[in-house]
Amino acid sequence: MPRVRSVLLLTVGLAAVPACTAPAPPSTDPRVAALVASISEERLEALLERLVSFDTRHTASNPDPAGRGIGAARQWIFDELARASPRLLVSFDTYQVAAQGERILHDVVLRNVAAVLPGRSPRRIYVSGHYDSIARLVDPPPSAGPPGGAGIHWNVPDSPAPGANDDGSGTVLTMELARAFAQSGIEFEATLVFIAFAGEEEGLFGAHLHAEKAWAEGAVIDAVFNNDVVGGAAGGTGAPNTDTVRVFAEGPEDSPSRQLARHIRKEAARYVPDHQVVLIARYDRFLRGGDHIAFNERGFPAIRVTEAHENYARQHRVEDTLDGVSFRYLAQNARVNAAGVATLALAPPAPRVTSETGAPTLGRGESGYDAQLRWVASPGAVSYRVYSRPAWSLDWDETVDAGNVTEHVRPNVSIDDFIFGVSAVGPGGHESLVSAYVNPARRPTTVRTVQ
Ligand SMILES: [Zn+2]
């Protein structure tokens, strides 16, 4: 996590960033601490037991039977969210999806389930999981016709698919956070969207459709906390999941998603100090994907939270059952989310560090050798914090309170050798994501030759 230093940073071969007197990190907000403490392990267990009881939540399963399949499951999620608090605006986010090849075998009505907790501002922060499940069958059932020869016939909509960990865990985490946030009595600055997506297992269908709609509507989305496979008791090697969780964030180094990841680690250390957040500088696990990618692809900051050690023998199989979930571990991961979401939802928006034309407002000052940072004031901010680190580094190294200003100058510091960023701090001490000054991408050069 970023360190607040009061001594000179000595870096061989580089001009050091001058030390400034920086205050101690703000103490915890008792309202956020109470919210985090209200996350209930027992409630998560009760929710997941019920969710798994629908036997399958395959997106193309028969939606009509009472008590079985995706139709009954999504109606139960809707009713539970509505029952949790009258402050939650619960709706189905519905799409007609046509049959497409091996992925969607027949036309389906796809419904995400969303619960909105309105804030003072329409800018949104999402918490998500996918409620659909899938179980690959090694041998095709007789009803599937002649074996396809592939050895795995997985797209069998109505065979059992408990999906306890993938992603029942992320779904009930999202539901429990919706309840805790709505019942907290806190008035948040940002509008919170708690959403359970469908169609993830077929290719992120529900998330893509929702993100596309949000993008077309011009929605401002400050963050997406996507939780997928967050409750496993142990990995396939037997390594236990106890006190560590991973957060995956797409690059480049100073993408908004990376700032979101850094924010989660910082706030988790403050509010859930006995649980460690490990940041992974990748958009997802190797050759894997998840619903946050649908938001990343449309330019929204979005990260994936996943357990420390996965058990591939249970994923996408009928073995993904309740006994593979640790509710103590799942509750800790829910608390990490709660700390990151609540603090961000209480903060002002991140400052803009670009000009109207998109150029970074970082220069060398009048001397030509200083670091001169300028930014556009954020509504509701009472002060700003300046971050810096050597240019070959992933973690912010220095933090300085700049006060209620829109310019900060570091004399005789090279803007080539350090990365700089600025965050906005609200009256309650809550801090936005850091806006980093990013060098524009190089344009490819075209050389025309004479024939
Ligand atoms: Zn999943």
Image (spheres, rainbow, N blue to C red):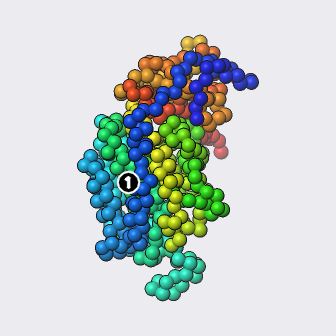
- Where in the figure is residue 226, as x and y percent of width and height? 46, 51
Q: What residue is at 42 percent from the left and 32 percent from the top?
A: 29
With respect to residue 48, does 245 lie above or below?
above
Residue with the mark numbered 1: 175
Check disc 1 and give the amino acid type: Met
Residue farthest toward the front in the current orientation of the protein: 42
Question: Can residue 376 be seen from the camera position used here?
Answer: yes
Left or right: residue 265 compared with residue 294: right
Q: What residue is at 61 percent from the left and 35 percent from the top?
A: 395
Question: How many dots with numbers?
Answer: 1
Residue farthest toward the top in the current orientation of the protein: 367
With respect to residue 63, does 368 lie above or below?
above
Question: Can residue 355 be seen from the camera position used here?
Answer: no
Label 1 crowd (10 A; few <14 / some 14-19 / many >=20):
many
Q: What residue is at 42 percent from the left and 51 percent from the top?
A: 40
Quarter containing the N terminus: top right
- Where in the figure is residue 136, as x and y percent of width and height? 52, 73
With respect to residue 384, does 291 lie above or below?
below
- Where in the figure is residue 352, as x and y percent of width and height? 44, 29
Q: Nearer the viewer, residue 233 or 96?
A: 233
